[in-house]
């Protein structure tokens, strides 16, 4: 990945450049101290990702993004900010910002966000390539179609901010197993049957132990998803991700309660109610529908 850094704080630029370089996250191809000075070099070098500060003199982050997009730039943006104003953050989400790096800059956060962003980009490009390849065929090869299920699940998980969570592989395998299974009754299986089938598919030595581990990983992953949705909703409840996933995949009253807690800074994850079956059912239905259309 090729990065361009725009920040009026030279120390922040230096830290970001060092983290990206030292941790081999990509290549920093340029930097600028404000939005105005970044326009020409960004349009000339076309980086994959622009790391851009929210508040800058002359031209702030949002204004810079608008100007670049109006001139045809199609790269991604990651916002750097220490502000907590919900209206301003909401405006950033509307402009297509998917990730924020908070100031003061933290190495672990930068690593995590850049890796997640790179993985999402890779998956979207992979899915696009598959769709373009399939467009030239009248029939879909079963083997190729099987691969697509995992890609489709990954897109959904990426949208919900849980693609790197511990249970993401479990979710992929479960949906692949359900999509390719022979479920003639059209009745969604019981969770215990899903866990047992996955454990046996993996040839686990201790089936019951693996079933319990699967459920725990799913619970932690879905907990992270509902937390992510509540955070987005507390900032901008009109965002695409919130409007689509919050009411479908979770108990919406629970999401609303969490949104209030996030806004009042009294978030308590131990009290969150998780509905694993509802989450799996909706993920299965949406992936299956997309899979049939490819």
Image: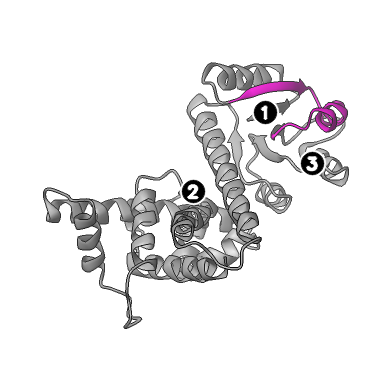
Q: Earlier in the sequence, mark 2 or mark 1?
A: 1
Residue at numbered disc 3: 65
User: Residue at left 82%, top 31%?
Assistant: 35
Where is residue 191 drawn, in percent x and y? 26, 67
Residue denoted by label 2:
265
Identify the residue at horizontal 61%, vertical 68% (top origin): 138
| Residue 279 placement, left or right of 73 | left
Q: Determine whether 193 is above or below 48 in the image.
A: below
Q: Which residues are magenta?
A: 26-48
How far apart are labels 2 and 1 at the CA level? 36 Å
Residue 83 in the figure: left or right of residue 265: right
Indicate the position of residue 123 as horizontal and vertical percent values. 55, 47
Quadrant assignment for the N terminus: top right
Quarter holding residue 175: bottom left
Name the mark nearer the viewer: 3 or 1: 1
How many C-alpha atoms fall within 10 Å of the one at disc 3: few (<14), some, or many (≥20)? Answer: many
SS under mark 1: strand
Reading the chain from its start, which is encountered first: label 3 or label 1?
1
Local packing at callout 1 (Cα closer than 10 Å; few below 14, some 14-19, many 20+) is: some
Compared with 201, 115 (above or below) is: above
Residue 111 appears left or right of 68: left
Name the element at disc 2: loop
Mark 2 or 1: in front is 1
- Whole-angstrom CA distance, mark 3 to mark 1, is 17 Å
Disc ID at residue 2:
1
Q: Nearer the viewer, residue 285 or 184?
A: 184
Which mark is drawn over residue 191? none
* Quadrant the C terminus occupies: bottom right
Distance between mark 3 and mark 2 Cα atoms: 30 Å
């Amino acid at each position: 990945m090729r990065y361009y850094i725009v920040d009026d704080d030279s120390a922040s630029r230096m830290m970001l450049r060092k983290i990206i370089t030292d941790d081999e996250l990509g290549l920093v191809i340029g930097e600028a101290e404000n939005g105005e000075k970044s326009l020409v070099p960004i349009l000339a070098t076309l980086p994959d990702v622009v790391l851009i500060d929210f508040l800058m003199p002359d031209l702030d982050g949002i204004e810079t993004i608008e100007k670049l997009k109006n001139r045809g730039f199609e790269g991604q943006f990651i916002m750097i900010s220490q502000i907590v104003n919900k209206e301003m953050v909401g405006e950033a989400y509307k402009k297509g910002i998917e990730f924020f790096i908070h100031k003061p800059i933290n190495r672990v956060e930068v690593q995590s966000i850049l890796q997640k962003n790179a993985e999402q980009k890779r998956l979207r490009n992979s899915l696009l390539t598959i769709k373009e390849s399939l467009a030239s065929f009248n029939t879909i090869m079963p083997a190729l179609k099987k691969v697509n299920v995992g890609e489709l699940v990954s897109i959904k998980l990426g949208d919900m901010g849980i693609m790197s969570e511990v249970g993401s592989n479990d979710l992929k395998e479960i949906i692949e197993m359900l999509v390719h299974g022979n479920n003639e009754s059209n009745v969604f299986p019981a969770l215990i049957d899903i866990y047992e089938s996955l454990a046996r598919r993996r040839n686990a030595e201790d089936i019951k132990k693996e079933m319990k581990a699967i459920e725990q990983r799913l619970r932690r992953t879905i907990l992270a998803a509902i937390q992510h949705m509540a955070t987005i909703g507390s900032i901008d409840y009109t965002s695409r991700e919130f409007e689509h996933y919050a009411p479908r995949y979770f108990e919406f009253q629970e999401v609303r309660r969490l949104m209030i807690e996030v806004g009042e800074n009294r978030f308590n994850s131990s009290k969150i109610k998780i509905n694993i079956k509802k989450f799996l059912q909706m993920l299965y239905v949406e992936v299956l529908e997309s899979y049939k259309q490819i």
